[in-house]
Amino acid sequence: MKIKRSEKIANQVKEATDLRLKLLSQLRQYKKIDGSEVNSIDRLVQAIELSAEGYKLILKDTPVSEVDRKSSMLSGPFFSSKEYISYWGTMPIIQLDLREISQLAGRDFGDGLFIFYYEPEEEADMQDAFSIPRAEVETQAMTPFGQGEVDDEESGDDADNENEDEELESPYEEEIFRKSSDTVKVIVGYESIGMQSQVSTIEFLFEELPESIKLNIKDDLNLFTKLTKSKDVFHILGSFYPIQYDVNEVAMPCLVHFPQWNATGNAQIFMSSPGHFEYYESYD
């Protein structure tokens, strides 16, 4: 797995990580001293804990005939088998090898494949997101591309569904997701955009603290938020810009951030442990 991290970004990650550890240590000590402030300190600790290094995707346009359908990619053709079918009535968005994500995040997100399909006409839910355990990825017979897919209206094998899928319009404005009948955007590596946090939430929670605590952590927290302001670009891990919800409301690490969603919103996929995902979308 290729990981690209410039010298500037590497320095930012180190400095922000050191500040993160220092702030968390200080806040946990204050929590032990002043039980009356447990709630506000806990919420600030949680918001800082949910900061993380984010990554843009390094993509390679690959001919459909050469795509390894077990690899990380955008828009498909994703892995499918008799048990794990493809849904051509929905938009295939992203497939991620969770071994790579676990390595990038430094925590266990599982080792299988994460697959996300989106239904533009349906309410936000995760009915078309799932993970396939690595053992099943390696042992299940894969269906030929264009066979074994199911759309919203009918089920069964129907090779014509491949053409129907090509006619669907993307529900967001990012050029990188636009489908091609000839090539697939395969994820061949990850480029760090640095440590990210939800600055607006952290700054708000800081103001709720007693003046005695604020005075002692103010300089470190100001530098931390200055360093970790989120970049509103499509990325995995890292953090996200809030519109109608914040990191404390979700209380799960960000897996994927979509900065442009249905023209006026943004959306995220969150994942707290192997097999446990949540999808949120928000609009101004």
Image: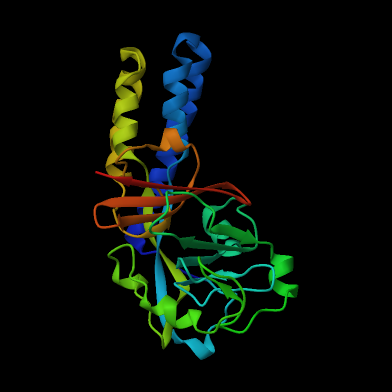
The C terminus - image quarter: top left
Q: Residue at 34% across / 32% down in the picture?
A: 202
Nearer to the camera, 50 or 282: 282
Picture quadrant of residue 40 = top left
Q: Is residue 141 above or below residue 244?
A: below
Q: Residue at 46% across / 38% down in the picture?
A: 250
Nearer to the camera, 25 or 130: 130
Q: Quick check: 135 left or right of 9?
A: right
Q: Residue at 48% across / 87% down in the picture?
A: 64
Nearer to the camera, 214 or 108: 108
Picture quadrant of residue 226 = top left
Q: Is residue 245 visible?
A: yes
Q: Residue at 72% across / 68% down in the picture?
A: 136
Q: Position of residue 122 (x, y in %)?
A: 42, 53
Nearer to the camera, 267 or 144: 144
Q: Position of residue 9 (x, y in %)?
A: 35, 57
Q: Quick check: 220 left or right of 256?
A: left
Q: Is residue 4 visible?
A: no
Q: Residue furthest front?
A: 153
Q: Is residue 70 above or below residue 257?
A: below
